[in-house]
Amino acid sequence: MLATVTAAFAEDPAWAFLLNGGYERLAPEFAGALFDLRVDSGNVWVSDDLATVSMWDSPANGDQQPPRVREVWARYVAAAGEPAHDRLIAYKYALAAVAPADPYWYLGVLATHPARRGEGLATAALAPGLAEADSSAMACCLETSTEANRRFYERRGFVEATDVVLAGGPPTWWLRRPAAPHGRSRDARDRADLGRSESG
């Protein structure tokens, strides 16, 4: 799974900004931290061969124990150093400035190994999280720093875009997919080949 995420974001402008020239060394550490923060919530979805993964924060993820969060980020900072940590904090503040006050599902990571793109895996990995958000009549949000990704997400309902102001960073957009009316699922396609990743 870490190999998939690391390969998928190798040319991503936001990851380049966050890792600041240390991609090969830091990308697996960063991907591991993102996974560790989410796996216990049951909101990590992978294909059987781990060629694609989606990592979500549900509105309830805010109930995570702060010591756990601090432990995960302390490991990352120890590996990455303070400058990388400072960039991450700046990035988080920039996102917080545009994030809605109402509860929402947040797609933190959607990655498909470059060798497997074009097979519909990313759409399949999105489907379970979107369905869970729809069932609770909540919006979904994410950010992206590439036009191609923005178009991909727009075709899947993320039609509301807000510019993220990030000093020294790449153009980035906060995308929002409105809540489904009356909690109805809009798209339950392609879920059969995906399963929740188990911790341990």
Image (cartoon, grey):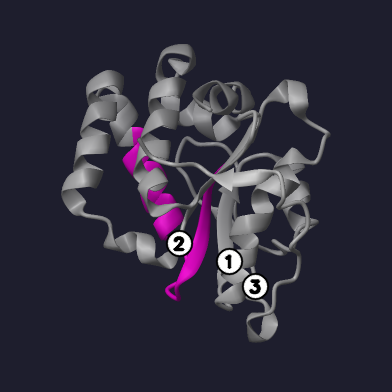
Mark 3 vs mark 1, CA separation in Å: 13 Å
Query: Whole-percent x and y of residue 145?
Result: 62, 41
SS class, disc 1: helix
Q: Which mark is residue 178?
A: 3
Tag 2 secondary structure: loop
What residue did someone put label 1 on? 132
Q: Which residue is mark 2?
A: 58
**Magenta span covers which residues?**
87-110
Labels 3, 2: front one: 2
Q: Is residue 152 visible?
A: yes
Secondary structure under tag 3 reads: loop
- The residue shown at (36%, 60%) is 61
The residue lying at 42 percent from left, 66 percent from top is: 59
Q: Are marks 2 and 1 in contact (CB under 8 Å)?
A: yes
Mark closer to the observer (2, 1) = 1
Q: Can the viewer see residue 175?
A: no
Q: Earlier in the sequence, mark 2 or mark 1?
A: 2
Q: N-terminal of the two: label 3 or label 1?
A: 1
